[in-house]
Image: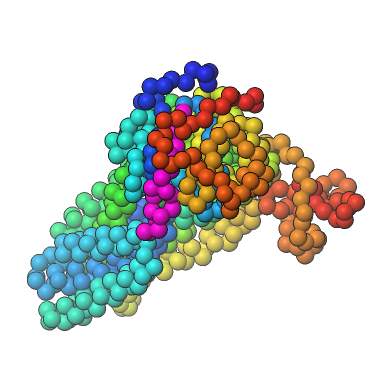
Amino acid sequence: MTLLELFSVPFMQRALIAAFLVGIAAPAVGTYIVQRRLALMGDGIGHVAVTGVAIGLWTQTSPTWTAVIVAIAGAVVIEVVRERGHAEGDVALAMLFYGGLAGGVFVTGLAGTGASRLQEFLFGSILTISVDDLLVTMALAVVLILICVGLSPQLFAVSQDADYAKVAGLPVRFYSILVAVLAALSVVIAMRTVGLLLVSALMVVPVAIVQQLTRSFRMTLLGAMGAGLAASVGGLVLAAALSRTGANVQPGPSIVLVALAGFFLVWPLGAWLRRRRALVAPFPETAPEEKPVDEAHPHHHGEKCGHVAVEHGDHVDYIHDGHRHAAHVGAEGEHYDEH
Amino acid sequence: MNPNGKRTVPADVPVQLVHGDVALSGRPVLREVDLTVNRGEFVALMGANGSGKSTLVRTLVGLNPLSAGRLELFGRALGGFHDWSRVGYVPQRSTATGGVPASVWEVVASGRLTHRKLLRPLRSADRAAIRAALEVVGMDAYAHRGVAQLSGGQHQRVLIARALAGRPELLLLDEPTAGVDLPNQHALAAALGRLKDDGATIVLVAHELGPLAPLVDRAVVMRDGRKAYDGPPLSDADVHAQGFDAGHVHCDDASTPSANPAVPTPLKEL
């Protein structure tokens, strides 16, 4: 069957709809996770959610709902440990992750369901998305997207500077836990397409791609949603196309690899942009009036000092800490004027 | 605003801390600190590293809980104070920024959150306040730059603009001049001078005042978590030389009720 015929198959259509929404929602939550410097949080929640899925399989209830409950519980524990900032918090979180994964595999064994059933949740599976799963995924994804975009001023402020947000009267703890719960929900809706062990990549890599090019939070948020969408649908189509040839490629790994490929494609452009901005940044057209200041200097500026050299009339200035230094030999020896 | 027009109604006193004790991780950091800041005053909190001046300013905005004592903002006990749009806070600048790019405009816009309702876009009044705040600190040309690209002094001015965007009556700044080069310190002093002229009450933590010195109405020097001096402005040299760091100057007798802890001083010419 051709690729086009594949798209007419119901399970593939369900998988595409799921990939479409998850590709938008996961990076939206991921932007806040990355902003809080918790890039690995999604990974941890994914590990804990394995136990939730296993409980669902064991009790023959919906793995989606047991995963929701366990993932939210795990996410809240992670957030509370992080907030307390204990030195041993790091180790406590590691133990939570291992416990989640080991518990999940163990309980699956108890249930007698094969490892292949669990694997559908670990790395995603195109074939197994039921209509009920799809409806839950769609509803949760829409809620996630609405919250991430609608509350972006508040979530941005809390994630950027929690102390400031607190003095501004925002309920910082509520919003922090909200972000953790959003992360848990995006893990669960992504588990059928990307899988629990790779879900974090779909939250983080699209953000990493676009933040090389952007300088505002808003553009990063929207750009990450677009990049996630492209990676998610592209990866799914890639996996489906390969499976046509008889290979058995799960969608999770192919989605993640497509996203990483996007990162490495954009990287040279980002490196060039950063370099250009770094050269331009200290000298905007409307620089405040600069007053010459003498300053003792620990080293001689020269070709090898690493500071950017700029010709300035009859001499060469060196850019240092955002201002220019000009070598100047005075009575007490060589020093540098700032100007 | 006319500084002589200070009202004496208690509800109008921006900051009143009485016998404040603060412990961080079980270690006492502030002991029996009394501090009243009157409307329109420019108070500099000074002292050596570890003297408790940053802890004090964080306590005043509610970031450190009091283990004993009483704190009132605008006449209301801290627990019952919800009018945070009247307070602007400029935290100590950290070199760490968020993990995601943010533009100067966005950071300053978060200063409007005290005035915004949930799920509402920025109104034109919000935009005007953001623009005005950026102009006061001289950063309006940088609005669409990323904050990660700024120098230390520029970043500091953005944090001040964020506080100003909320149009606060009381502004508290934690070491705004630390790590800021002299031209930026002058720009900062000019911005704070404009605020002071508009009648804002300003409390500022500083290790050294530098170009801010002419603005200061009153200096409070901290030593070992206690108030060691509260009175007319001191020069930087006085603070260090007169032994507030290590010497024998005692704070105003702590057992005296703080009937008049604020020493009114004439406003200096700018």
Q: Quadrant of residue A153?
A: top left
What percent of the width, then of the height, locates residue A138? 23, 53
**How many numbered callouts?**
0
Query: Looking at this rendering, what residue extends furthest in the right direction?
Result: A331
**Left or right of residue A96, residue A260 in this image:** right
Q: Which of B162 and A284 is in front in this view?
A: B162
In depth, the one of A173 and B49 nearer the eye is: B49
B238 left or right of A96 in image: right
Residue A116 visible within the image: no
Residue B37: within the magenta? yes
**Position of A191 relative to A179 (above/below):** below
Residue A230 x, y percent position in the rendering:
39, 57
Residue pictured at 60% horizontal, 35% vertical: B233
Image quarter of the N terminus of chain A: bottom left
Which scheme is used to colour this image of the protein? rainbow
In this orientation, which residue lies closer to the viewer: A99 or A224?
A99
In the image, residue B124 lies in the stretch drawn in magenta: no
Residue A152 x, y percent position in the rendering: 37, 44
Q: Residue at x 43, y 42 (%)?
A: B254
Where's residue A19, x and y in %? 30, 59
The magenta segment is B21-38
Q: In which quarter of the image is the C terminus of chain A?
A: top right
Picture residue at 54% right of the left edge, 40% below the top: B229
The image shows residue B155, relative to residue B256, as above or below, that is below
